[in-house]
Amino acid sequence: MVSSSTTISASCASKGSPSLSPQKKITLKVKAQQDGGEDIYKIGYGAHLKKLMDAYCTKRNLERTTVRFIFRYKELKPRQTPAQLMMEEGDIIDIVTDQGGG
């Protein structure tokens, strides 16, 4: 099992929320179902998850359209933030890749 860490720089996505600090970051684990590989990403608590999704796909040389990101049994959308999903430090996002075929 290979584990690596990536920090994603992002400004706070929710502009109207004074209680949310743009400096606050959260560490999330991204775990692939197929090979059990795990990557660690640090992302702003108010940043869109698109940044994490794009970074993961680039690192693994995958097309974004072939990968689904799952958290608490629900597929994540790129414009969601860790704050909206009430994610906590060390939470795990599961990766499911679509198997082509007929």
Image: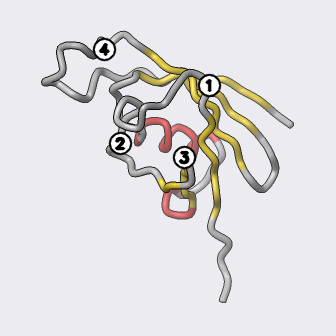
**Residue type marked 3:** Phe
The residue drawn where x is 50% and y is 20% is: 26
Q: CA distance from mark 3 to mark 2?
A: 11 Å
The residue drawn where x is 45% and y is 16% is: 25
**Residue type marked 4:** Pro
Q: Which residue is mark 4?
A: 22
53 vs 59, nearest the viewer: 53
Q: Earlier in the sequence, mark 1 or mark 2?
A: 2
Q: Give coordinates of residue 2: x percent, y percent.
A: 82, 34
Local SS, label 1:
loop
Q: CA distance from mark 4 to mark 3?
A: 23 Å
Image disc number at residue 71? 3
Mark 4 touches mark 3? (CB < 8 Å): no
Local SS, label 3:
strand
Q: CA distance from mark 1 to mark 2?
A: 18 Å
Local SS, label 2:
loop
Q: CA distance from mark 4 to mark 1?
A: 19 Å
21 to the left or right of 18: right
Comparing labels 3 and 2, the label whose residue is closer to the camera: 3
Crowd class of label 1 (few under 14; some 14 to 19; many from 20; radius 10 Å)? some
Crowd class of label 4 (few under 14; some 14 to 19; many from 20; radius 10 Å)? some
Q: Quadrant of residue 58?
A: top right
Q: Give coordinates of residue 3: x percent, y percent.
A: 77, 29
Mark 4 touches mark 1? (CB < 8 Å): no
Q: Which residue is mark 1?
A: 90
Q: CA distance from mark 4 to mark 2?
A: 16 Å
Crowd class of label 2 (few under 14; some 14 to 19; many from 20; radius 10 Å)? some
Q: CA distance from mark 3 to mark 1?
A: 12 Å
The residue drawn where x is 58% and y is 29% is: 28
**Residue type marked 1:** Gly
